[in-house]
Image: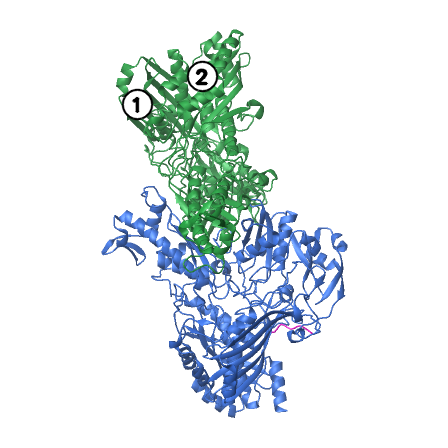
Chain colours: A blue, B green
Amino acid sequence: MAISRYVGARVRRKEDPRLITGTSLYVDDLKLPGMLYVAFVRSTYPHARITRIDPAPALEMPGVVAVITGQDLRKWVKGADLSAGEGTAGEEEEGAGAVPQVDPLAVDVVRYVGQPIAAVLAEERYLAHDAAAAVQVDYEPLPVVTDPEEAMKDGAPQLYPQVKNNIGVRWDHKRGDVEGAFAQADTVVKQRFRNQRLSGVPMETRVVAAAPEPLTRGVTVWSSTQAPHWSRDAIAGALGLAQSQVRVIAPEVGGGFGVKIGVYQEDVVLAALARHLGRPVKWFETRSEHMLVTNHGRDQVVEYEAAVRKDGKILALRANIIQNLGAYPKGLFLPATTGTMLVGCYDIPAVEIHAVGVYTNTMAVGAYRGAGRPEAAYYIERMVDLVADALGLDPAEVRRVNFIRPEQFPYTTATGERYDTGEYEKALNRALEVAKYQEWRQRQQEMRQQGRHIGIGMASYVEICGFGPWESATVRVEPSGAVSVYTGTSPHGQGLETALAQLVADELGANFDEVVVHHGDTASVPQGNGTMGSRSLVVGGGALLMAIERVREKARRIAAHLLEAAVDDIEFADGKYRVKGAPDRALTLAQIAGAAYGPGLPAEIEPGLVATDFFAPPDEVFPFGTHVAVVEVIPETGEVKILQYVSVDDCGPRINPLLVEGQVHGGLAQGIAQALYEEVQYDENGQLLTGTLMDYAVPKANMLPSFITDKTETTTPLNPLGAKGIGEAATIGSTPAVANAVMDALKPLGIKHLDIPLTPQKVWAAIQQAQA
Amino acid sequence: MAISRYVGARVRRKEDPRLITGTSLYVDDLKLPGMLYVAFVRSTYPHARITRIDPAPALEMPGVVAVITGQDLRKWVKGADLSAGEGTAGEEEEGAGAVPQVDPLAVDVVRYVGQPIAAVLAEERYLAHDAAAAVQVDYEPLPVVTDPEEAMKDGAPQLYPQVKNNIGVRWDHKRGDVEGAFAQADTVVKQRFRNQRLSGVPMETRVVAAAPEPLTRGVTVWSSTQAPHWSRDAIAGALGLAQSQVRVIAPEVGGGFGVKIGVYQEDVVLAALARHLGRPVKWFETRSEHMLVTNHGRDQVVEYEAAVRKDGKILALRANIIQNLGAYPKGLFLPATTGTMLVGCYDIPAVEIHAVGVYTNTMAVGAYRGAGRPEAAYYIERMVDLVADALGLDPAEVRRVNFIRPEQFPYTTATGERYDTGEYEKALNRALEVAKYQEWRQRQQEMRQQGRHIGIGMASYVEICGFGPWESATVRVEPSGAVSVYTGTSPHGQGLETALAQLVADELGANFDEVVVHHGDTASVPQGNGTMGSRSLVVGGGALLMAIERVREKARRIAAHLLEAAVDDIEFADGKYRVKGAPDRALTLAQIAGAAYGPGLPAEIEPGLVATDFFAPPDEVFPFGTHVAVVEVIPETGEVKILQYVSVDDCGPRINPLLVEGQVHGGLAQGIAQALYEEVQYDENGQLLTGTLMDYAVPKANMLPSFITDKTETTTPLNPLGAKGIGEAATIGSTPAVANAVMDALKPLGIKHLDIPLTPQKVWAAIQQAQA
């Protein structure tokens, strides 16, 4: 590719040739000699005591090698820490009950349908599944609770004796004169919102393989994870091994969306089996298992109340957030993350928030695209529209009245977040302009008169990106000038290899096609925190730039020697290392690299051209934007058609607009799906109703419009790139934008609020009721 | 292991549990899905023109996938640079003829028996061999030359048109008043010596596997090599790939002895096949192939002449060295290395050396344990004994008269080597004392009178170790305090993982059992030059110490923060990081590592506890020693029995005496084998006579005595450890010691010199002739 400058260009993805041609290797492609296949015996009860496990029928099947129960496993594994989640790194949680330790295979009590009880090892994969089905488990059922509001009540079934009222975490926060604000308010707007439970549904489910490692006398684990170093640390801890004895490899990973952060029970079990049976083992999560036992997202209810002045100014907020944690600690960070983002883009001086996380007999809830921020954005953006409605104002105007103004940054919210930079009104104005908002308002009037239910919705969002505590990068210039990069982030579809290679090409003078970005192997990457929370470019790219800077300094020293100039007279410009003011005296990176390793290097210059650096961002960054959706509701079916969708996102400078747009498109699909289609549902007995993709409505292409994407660009001073991250943004903006549009369409019918997902059934029923 | 200080202790090898239990993985253990097995069609002629290759009979066999010829391969590969050898790194050779480029598969002309002509790929290994045998090759024989002295003559068969008289390299050197010295000499001692051709015979032969690599669009090569980075660079060059696109992995390697330095034709062919056929491929060298086509060692003749004063003082040397290079450039460095070491431990002021390397129709000769130094030591040590004999002096006395004295160091020889430090007489005295030399001389007299042929031989050697240009090391302290080390050396049996872990334990305060030393993978090791020439501990250990020092400095900064002390007040002592003068205020490495990655690190301390460093030694180091052998020759059979063997070696400080003794024991076996048993032989038609271990006499345990090992200890100022290396030393000292002993035993019979190996047949024949 002949590109003079890569950063900012629409560079095609380095990743695609191998993905498109099917030559990439995923964990399930791994086949090792003597490998055994693992299937899990899983609880069919949401809450029960195990009275007996009889492996005999399975063990009688030829080719079945072993059945390992929780009691067996306790000899090899202490409890696993499964609580890692997006946004937890380096943050402290304000807890309530003690955090329960989880046995990777249940001992005595099961607490959700699907909980692993025993691992069956067999020579063939399908045999392992058949044998798992043959293991007989006797249960003594216990009372079940799936609704967190029920679970908090005295007398409700208790999941853990040490956790009173099932409240696993509590976050309370009050700032400003809330009572005064509510007393002075012209209006108080109240609403109860529900943010439904969702499933991650990456194309590749979770897959784990493990093999004993003779070098370290430990274990190598291949896992479809977003954070191999975290998995390494957790597995070492669970198995009582040194961290140097555990190697975790995340080869190609087919999507994560947050649900592949942190270890699962299966990772720990496979590692223990490989180590103690001395054979390689592999487990592949079926799609049904994925729906059942890969962590879910969202699942909150909130009682929300705003004190409002008649011009639309929100004076104070009160919120009572109840987070369904599911059956074990995974999403302990969610109440606090939701709480701190609850004011959105707005300058709201007083808040009172009470948030709890509550255990129930359902699958654990944890990180899922945005994790806490989409919930918060949904609440406040719906609230602003309800305020506009209550006061008869244009929702854009209410936003303008409340926005934090550019000159107020850095701005600390009443909830305690320190926003770096923002131009919220500019993004809103741009979105309204691109969306032809005023024209649409006019058309809406006309079409309503024709009996058509047109709705226009907008949402202005802000979110947290770029979690620390740090990220690492190594840049190694090979003797030929080719470059190998090692990043502690662990991309799994985002295209980060391309973005990082662009930085290396421009900032080091490397040949883009000879830059290879390695990741996802704890053996070769110095250290890392993985890919989540839009931290990869922001923090990982920052670390890369710092390592590049070190390499460049070394290159300048070598160039000075070769060109017989002073180091201070060498500059890196136009892709070469040049003597200032002498255009002919210049060296390429390859020429310098050759000298860096070759003979003839003077003694005062240490050989080599490699550097490792860590970037610890001083704080998180806050991308933002405004989305505008235009929808039509078909009253006869309750169906929602999206007529136009405009997404204006501000993630700061865009290293590769193609990649940013990819993230935005995918994020919109996922956020719109929450607004209209997807919901994980349990029945009252704790049985999952949405266990297949026939029941859980992931949208198809024909259910989505062609998106119009646009941008504003506001840099942050908090990292070397000035960038803010784009991984979750579109998901966060789109759910409230579409919900607001649908509610706008239904307003003439007197319908004030419906909980998402706004499925045809729900919308149709509401219309029927309204018209009745 | 509860050891207070690891360095210097007899620490058991970290490597052994995995090796003893058979859980280690060698290249041949690698089985990848879809893997094809490769066998080579090899030349049956030593010199011929290929007139036709007919692959049809092979391709008709079911399961045979392809037959690739040299012409096919030229589309994918330009000529391979096969000339890498021990001691070449960073050194310049003084050449004669142009260096021929070698096609990995022969095109048109074959030049030695065994030269690869075509690669056959099949689904099964044995099928590949059968199919290779079925490929029909028609040859037009060309005249053959196997003797380098014949090959140098005008009119001899020419291997390469551009190489006149087959002389591939020439090294001429003259210093001092040679003519004057010979004119003044009391005696001139002349001898022609032959240093026979040897084979490496590692337990694991060469094995290569290769697979296409989707990440880099390049190739991953697994090779049983001593220098994976050199292989990486050579394969990238041959295939026209960036170095970032080629990954070379040396997993466990079962011995090298120098013959696994640098790429071979097979490495390049396998890499090209994997890349262009898009399938994993593997080739396993049979033992017969090993004898035929893995580079041989030694194979020199020298005409040697010493000008001697009557007190034994050697005034000048003249030598004419002829190195058989075999059929292609691999050992171009051997004439110069032999030449520069030709004066041994002695202060000889004048030398005139003419050395040539000559191509012949035999397998290439290259690095083999010591590579040039054993040849030189053999010549000078035999010469000293011949001088003693000529003058009627004790050989120990002649050595003492000639030794470079301790106060002369650093000492530059007339041949141009700069010896760092040495106490040659001390080592000789120690060896004679341990060997009870004077007692043995007395017993020798007595036993001779009983008709027994007892011989006492000694050899004082000095050799070159610690080749540069540099080595790299990365030290990574994991958050738990466990340590991962990455070294650019590539140990293959030496126990270096143990030695380096000892350094880390003592110098960093790490838990020895939690130190894992990684090597042999170009993807995870920053850069490297591999293991050869006893450079691993000397240069690789130096790099490690430098990296440790960086990590320790960082650890002190973190400790200062945690202990609220000034950085200058923190010292590393007794395994902990301590506030000077406050015994209670101390932190372990694990405590510091936890803080290094955790939250709460102050902004001025960059996170992480990892460092990479490179060590470029200012010069080579020169270990030395004296060996004393007592032998008895059985005249009826010609058999040589070793009655006592004393090895006193000075390699400087010993990090692990157990490992040093292991190297000495193995080296003695190999050096004694050259003196008595081993020889690669070709017939005059260029056909290998010693193609199996029935013909090539590797010694068995019962053919060797129990060794008595001892030491002196002289440090070098040239590296941080002060160490000198022990990998080749015992091989170098033992060949002349045993040869001298045998000749001493035969002296009463009037036998002055026999060329090694002193096989029963040769000795018996000489005795018969002497007595006739």
Q: Nearer the viewer, mark 2 or mark 1?
A: 1
| Residue A373: image location, x then y, percent | 52, 72
Residue B291 horizontal side relative to residue A593, left or right: right
Residue behind mark 2: B754
Number of other residues with Cα within 10 Å of mark 2, as a class: few under 14, some 14 to 19, many 20 or more:
some
List x then y, in percent, for residue A633: 55, 84
Residue at x 52% of width, y 88% of height: A187
Look at the numbered disc 2 and give the secondary structure of its residue.
Answer: loop
Which residue corresponds to mark 1? B349
Q: Which residues are magenta?
A: A678-683
- Of pointers 2 and 1, the one earlier in the residue sequence: 1
Predominant SS of the magenta segment: loop
**Three-letter amino acid code of the residue under disc 1:** Pro
Up/down of A434 relative to B702, above or below: below
Q: Are marks 2 and 1 in contact (CB under 8 Å)?
A: no
Residue B612 in sight from this viewpoint: yes
> Can you say whether A756 is above or below B439 in the image?
below
Q: Is residue A442 left or right of residue B354?
A: right
Instruction: Please report, as a chain letter, where disc 2 is located.
Output: B
Query: Magenta includes A682?
Result: yes
Q: Chain of mark 1?
A: B
Q: Residue pushed farthest left?
A: A581
In this rendering, do the residues under marks 2 and 1 share a single chain? yes
> In what element is the residue under mark 1?
loop
